[in-house]
Image: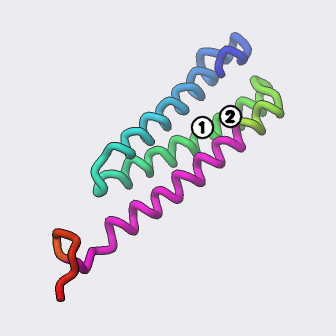
Amino acid sequence: MHGRFPKSKRYTLGQRCDDLLIDALESVVRAAHSAPTEKSASLERSSAVIDTAKLLFRVAKDTRCITNEEYLTVQSKLITCGKMIGGWIRQAKTKTVTPSSEGSNGIGRS
């Protein structure tokens, strides 16, 4: 994405936007492969990175590094990702907080 930025901002703001998107992707992959007790922390990081990316893309639009159409496209995708991560966070928290009433082998006691 940063290739479309003006040369003066390409390696500052543009590179940072790209780095944040890669960081968010890495955090989501890390969460997908982590233990249930560690999943929530990775997802919280992903959510924070997505929020920061939203802010930086807003700055990029305001400084006319990207067009309004590009901004709206990126912003809608970031909002969708944020909603998905938020749902995943809620699911991960309920799974770690709610203890199972069944035995360790998954079979209820009679």
Q: How dense is the environment of label 1, judged by Cα within 10 Å: few (below 14), some, or many (20 and up)?
A: many
Q: Which residues are magenta?
A: 74-102
Q: Residue at x 82, y 33 (%)?
A: 69
Badge 1 marks a residue whose secondary structure is helix
Q: Which residue is mark 2?
A: 57
Q: Position of residue 2 (x, y in %)?
A: 65, 19
Please name the residue shown 39% across and 68% down the image.
Answer: 94
Amino acid beneath label 2? Phe
The reply to whether discs 1 and 2 touch (Cβ–Cβ < 8 Å) is yes
The answer to which of 91 and 102 lies nearer the viewer is 102
Residue 50 painted magenta? no
Q: Secondary structure at mark 2?
A: helix
Vertical side of 15 occupied by 30: above or below: below
Q: Position of residue 43 (x, y in %)?
A: 43, 49
Q: Which residue is mark 1?
A: 53
Task: Quarter of the image for the C terminus: give it.
Answer: bottom left
Q: Is residue 23 left or right of residue 76?
A: left
